[in-house]
Image: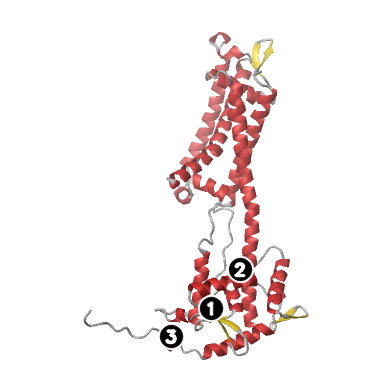
């Protein structure tokens, strides 16, 4: 039921966007044909009758010849295409996304690329513990998760509860976290997985090409212009579709001509009140939808930009924390050059704020554009001593004894 509703919702968006655009273009073509017919056979409203000598039909004939020429040019251009060109075009059509999915992606995006990140982070933490004798320090936890120091203190408590870990203190008062239960699990983790800190992916506006997104914007812009045009004329012109001339009633000329031709068409189709139909059907409804079609992606783009900056800051914190662990006595924030765009915030001050945040938490000493993380150095030095005294073999599960009478 939910999937059906989503499919109907996507189809409705496409119908509103493309359907109104096609309808507006069709009305414009009708107005052009009516204009040519009037020029050829007289401007009177009754020029379509046989008593006027068929002038209107002559205009329609000339317009038909014009479209016939366009179709012939298209046909011959298709006829003389090379096999390679035809094959390439067929491949492009096969790889093209369905229209309803492309439009929906433009409006609402394609979801969160980091969905299930908690599980990804948990696997990275467990992999580190299983390759570091079940022992972890807070600087290491921050380097893996990219969390702020305040958030990391809360998160590590959840890990202790889930994996039956315990906070421990060395003889010198160094706090660390022990997870011996993880070492007793069957299976091993390669060292490369235990030394990696996965980075979050940036959220994209849509999975469409820029050309496709721009096309949707142009189509919607045309709907805005047409909808605004019909709404304005329905208010200002109303049901005055015709003007009196020496030859009888004629469609209004100039800017309201398309509106007058549309009213004339609706009357021919049997509409008793074409003004209301134009006001609501061609004015209010498409204009309201088109404004939403512009507003939703615009607001989503602003929100997306903020979320991506948060993701970049978190990824950058991982990069910096890992560099601090590698060089705690000579950490220079200005030399940090992340190799991936996911860790490069748009605001240059973000890197400075993150480095100051980590320095304040670890009580680092600033020295001419660099920091000495003496406390981190001492913690990591002591934790290596703790790891060297842990016997992994004693923590592994022993042989299982089965009862022969079972």
Q: Which residue is mark 3?
A: 395
Q: Which residue is mark 2?
A: 340
Q: Crowding near pointer 1: few (<14 within 10 Å), some, many (20+)? A: some
Task: Give whichever of 87, 372 is nearer the camera.
Answer: 372
Task: Give whichever of 292, 184 is nearer the camera.
Answer: 184
Examine the image and state in which quarter residue 34 appears: top right
**SS of the residue under disc 1:** loop
Q: Is residue 323 left or right of residue 95?
A: right
Residue at left offset 52%, top offset 73%: 159
**SS of the residue under disc 2:** loop
In the rendered image, the quadrant that contains the C terminus is bottom left
Measure the alpha-carbon separation of dots 2 and 1. 18 Å
Q: Is residue 328 visible?
A: no
Residue at left offset 54%, top offset 75%: 196
| Label placed on residue 124 | none
Task: Give whichever of 12, 399 is nearer the camera.
Answer: 399
């Amino acid at each position: 039921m939910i999937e059906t509703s989503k499919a109907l919702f996507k189809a409705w968006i496409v119908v509103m966007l493309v359907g109104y655009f096609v309808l507006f273009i069709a009305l414009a073509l009708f107005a052009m044909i009516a204009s040519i017919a009037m020029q050829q056979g007289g401007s009177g409203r009754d020029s379509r009758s046989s008593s006027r000598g068929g002038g209107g039909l002559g205009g329609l004939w000339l317009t038909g010849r014009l479209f016939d020429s366009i179709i012939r040019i298209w046909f011959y251009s298709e006829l003389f295409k090379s096999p390679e060109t035809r094959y390439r075009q067929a491949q492009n059509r096969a790889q093209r996304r369905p229209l309803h999915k492309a439009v929906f992606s433009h409006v609402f995006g394609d979801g969160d690329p980091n969905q299930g990140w908690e599980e990804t982070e948990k696997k990275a933490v467990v992999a580190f513990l299983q390759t570091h004798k079940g022992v972890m320090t807070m600087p290491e936890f921050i380097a893996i998760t990219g969390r702020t120091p305040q958030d990391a203190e809360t998160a590590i408590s959840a890990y202790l509860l889930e994996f039956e870990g315990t906070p421990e203190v060395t003889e010198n008062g160094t706090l660390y976290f022990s997870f011996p239960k993880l070492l007793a699990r069957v299976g091993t983790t390669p060292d490369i997985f235990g030394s990696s800190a996965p980075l979050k992916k940036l959220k994209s506006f849509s999975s469409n090409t820029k050309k496709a997104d721009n096309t949707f914007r142009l189509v919607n812009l045309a709907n805005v212009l047409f909808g605004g045009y019909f709404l304005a004329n329905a208010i200002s012109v109303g049901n005055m579709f015709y003007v009196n001339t020496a030859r009888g009633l004629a469609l209004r000329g100039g800017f309201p001509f398309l509106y007058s031709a549309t009213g004339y068409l609706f009357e021919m189709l049997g509409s008793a009140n074409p003004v209301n139909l134009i006001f609501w059907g061609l004015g209010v409804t498409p204009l309201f939808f088109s404004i939403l079609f512009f507003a939703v992606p615009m607001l989503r783009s602003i929100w997306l930009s903020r979320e991506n900056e948060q993701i970049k800051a978190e990824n950058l914190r991982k990069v910096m924390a890992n560099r601090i662990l590698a060089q705690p006595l000579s950490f220079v924030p200005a030399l940090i050059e992340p190799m991936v765009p996911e860790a490069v915030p748009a605001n240059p001050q973000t890197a400075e704020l993150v480095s100051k945040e980590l320095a304040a938490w670890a009580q680092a000493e600033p020295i001419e554009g660099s920091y000495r993380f003496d406390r981190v150095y001492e913690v990591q030095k002591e934790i290596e001593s703790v790891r060297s005294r842990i016997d992994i073999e004693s923590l592994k599960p022993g042989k299982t004894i089965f009862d022969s009478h079972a």
